[in-house]
Amino acid sequence: MNLNSLSPAKGSVKNNTRKGRGSGSGKGGTSTRGHKGAKSRSGYSRKIGFEGGQMPLQRRVPKFGFKNLNRIAYKGINVSTLQTISEAKGIEEFTPEVFVELGLVSGKERVKVLGGGELSKKLTVTCHAVSASAKEIIEKNGGSVSTI
């Protein structure tokens, strides 16, 4: 075997077809692009959402609603959840740091205690917001609520 006798395997190397280079190439004339229209022109690129001149979906569907940029979102935690955790882990004092450690909220989320469920323990809760019903339930059991 010599270096000059090496050649690629049969069928592995294919010549590129040069479209639009005369009728003798077999790909001349319209260069496989069909007749006329935007797609046959050079430099054509279809806009996102273009539907052939029909009014596009994003323009047919009306705009609605309002997104308040100053909205403060809270992660709601029910009183029943506090009761369950208090029984399981023996925690009497809940702060935002405790909620993060327990995995109930991420570090940046604000906590709001809600009045869903029942409570039978005396708890001390510190949170960003609290509903009136939750405050009533916690204070009825001798606990205290403070907001940050």
Image (cartoon, grey):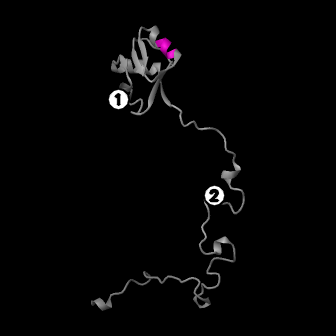
Query: Where 50 falls versus 103 (above or below)?
Result: below
Query: Where 60 falls versus 29 (above or below)?
Result: above
**Residue 81 found in image quarter:** top left
**Image quarter of the C terminus:** top left
* Left or right of residue 80, residue 5 in this image: left
Which label was assigned to residue 64? none
- Residue drawn at x 53%, y 33% is 71
Provide the residue designation for mark 2.
Answer: 49
- Is residue 107 rendered magenta in the image? no
Q: What stretch of residues is rendered in magenta?
A: 133-137
CA separation, marks 1 and 2? 46 Å
Which is nearer the eye, 22 or 80? 22
Badge 2 amino acid: Gly
Q: Position of residue 120 (x, y in %)?
A: 43, 11
**Among all residues in the image, which is located at the extreme front?**
70
* Left or right of residue 49, residue 147 in this image: left
* Left or right of residue 53, residue 101 in this image: left
Majority secondary structure of magenta residues? helix
Q: Circle 2 sits in a helix, a strand or a loop, which is it?
A: loop
Q: Position of residue 28 (x, y in %)?
A: 61, 85
- Residue drawn at x 43%, y 15% is 145
**Residue 49 found in image quarter:** bottom right
**Image quarter of the N terminus:** bottom left
